[in-house]
Image: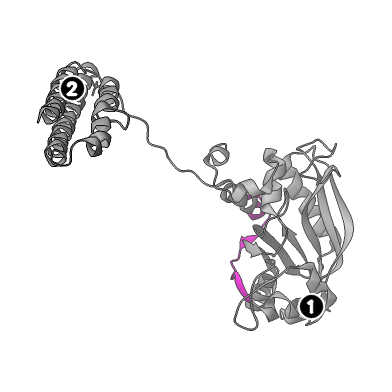
Amino acid sequence: MEAQENWINKLERLQDQAFKDLQQAHKETELQNWHVTYLGRSSELMGIFSHIPQAPKEQRPLIGQKANLVKQALESQYSTRLEALKQETLEHSLKSEKLDITLPGRKATRGRLHIATQILREIYRIFAEMGFQIYLSPEVETDAYNFELLNIPAYHPARDLWDTFYTTTPGVIMRTHTSPGQIRAMREFAPNPVRVVLPGMVYRYEQMDASHEIQFNQLELLAVGENITFGDLRGTLEDFAHRMYGEDVQTRMRPSYFPFTEPSAEMDVQCIVCGGEGCPVCSGTGWLEILGCGMVHPVVLKNGGYDPKIFSGFAAGLGPERIAMLRYHIEDIRYFWSNDVRFLEQF
């Protein structure tokens, strides 16, 4: 009996001392220290629980019951005190941290046109001044319009120039260039002269790097009429480059090959990012290709509804993102579609 009274008295003294110390806790950190002292794994109370098996067998239930009551009382008081401290902290914050409702609020963030949209509109404006009109064509195309009617029959080696996304529907693909729009525009306007720009997104299964993407904007240029020459093509493109980049811009045209134009060429602009010294954007060459071009192939003219003996024409495929990279010194084409607000807010 005496041993039992010693255990009970010890628990009561422990509870009284815990309650006194709890009232002295005025901060959450002090309350946490109290919890460790009286309810933690190494606390005196937990030590009593671990020593109950050493008490006489007939006294263990009473000692265990008393220890549980003390533990419940301490936990209850702890919870009450913790809630009271949180309320005190909140009230102090409300009194000391006043809100001045007369101050102006944060200015709402406003959207703006994407840089790709801005550069496309600038290109539209330049070519509109030259007498071209916009003609829209579908992004999901048939194999016939994307290849065959452009003088690229099935199994033609030139098909390897375009890494194509095929759909599950036979003969339906994601267009690899805007050139299919040439056939659609010619068939709509023939036999009248036509002068159009055909903008839109194109898709190619390519390895992405600083100057290549799997999806990007392209803009097709097409002019068909009588007595149109390669000189008209070159003059049009050089005029465009000067309007876009300034009169001092350096350009060059190189012979090239496209199945739907003959002769064919590529037009480069001296890299404005590095000033022609070489950088990742221009692959160290000092020049960046902005378009491919050439005189419309007689077969393509015929497929579009024109007599190649009477009519001639030129076509060009421009890369708006590359044009923007040169104009605004953008070093990586992947920035256009990364949706990084820090990049987009610059334009």
**Residue 191 appears anywhere in the view:** no
Q: Nearer the viewer, mark 1 or mark 2?
A: 2
Give the residue drawn at x 87%, y 62%: 256
**Which quadrant would the N terminus be assigned to in this image?**
top left
Three-letter amino acid code of the residue under disc 1? Ile
Q: Could you give the CA–CA distance between mark 1 and mark 2, rounded to whole angstroms?
A: 90 Å
Label 2 element class: helix
Rendered image: mark on residue 280? none
Q: Is residue 205 above or below residue 320?
A: below
Q: Is residue 146 magenta?
A: no
Looking at the image, residue 289 sits to the left or right of residue 61; the answer is right
Whether pointer 1 and pointer 2 mark residues with C-beta atoms closer than 8 Å, the reply is: no
Residue tagged by mark 1? 152
**Residue 29 appears anywhere in the view:** yes
Query: Residue 235 placed where, x, y %?
Result: 81, 53
**Which quadrant would the C terminus be assigned to in this image?**
top right
Three-letter amino acid code of the residue under disc 2? Ala
**Of the residues under marks 1 and 2, which one precedes in the sequence?**
2
- The magenta stretch is 125-141
Query: Residue 200 placed where, x, y %?
Result: 61, 62
Give the residue drawn at x 13%, y 41%: 58
Depth check, front residue: 47 or 288:
47
Q: Is residue 205 above or below residue 326?
A: below
Residue tagged by mark 2? 18
Give the residue drawn at x 77%, y 56%: 291
User: To which quarter of the image does residue 94 belong?
Assistant: top left
